[in-house]
Image: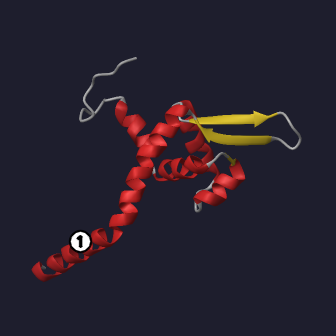
Amino acid sequence: MQVSTSIHEPMCPQRAILEHVTSRWGVLVFAALRERSYRFSELRRTVGGVSEKMLAQTLQTLERDGFVNRDAKPVIPPRVDYSLTPTGRQVADQVWALTKWVAENTDNVFEARETYDLKRQASA
């Protein structure tokens, strides 16, 4: 299905996908799964700070969008592995580029914040 609606329009379907990809936990899941596949508990520890419920919801959403593969093994105890699909790998690479940029420019952002805050305080 080819969608031609502009991303700037309120009902644009691409907005939901963009929201899933760039959500707080989505970005961190993509960054982790970019390295390798993970079991749920491993992924939760790797992501850090995410609740079990939020991680489960994020993984389900990303699986539904075709970015994450859920591989349930019929063993006892049950084993479920999560990995990126080929499409998920493409998205993860894009998200990783943004993540790297943020890491490389954090000092500039903090400096800009400080400058902004000082200007606001001076004008108050």
Q: Please give the name of the residue rendered at 44% of the width and 51% of the height, measured from the top-left corner.
A: 96
Residue situated furthest bottom in the rendering: 122
Q: At numbered mark 1, what does the secondary structure look like: helix, strand or loop?
A: helix
Residue extending furthest top?
1
Residue 37: % across, % down: 66, 45
Q: Residue furthest right?
A: 76
Query: In this picture, is 108 found above or below 72?
Result: below
Q: Is residue 118 left or right of residue 102?
A: left
**Residue 83: quadrant of the picture:** top right
Q: Which residue is mark 1?
A: 112
In which image quadrant can residue 60 be found?
Answer: top right
Asked if residue 28 lies left or right of residue 75, the reply is left
Q: Residues within 10 Å of mark 1 (few under 14, many from 20)?
A: few
Whether residue 22 appears in this view of the structure is no
Q: Is residue 83 above or below residue 9?
A: below
Q: x, y percentage for residue 11? A: 31, 29
Residue 97 in view of the camera: yes
Amino acid at dot 1: Ala
User: Is residue 110 placed above or below 1 in the rendered structure?
Assistant: below
Where is residue 46 shown, x and y percent of the image? 62, 59
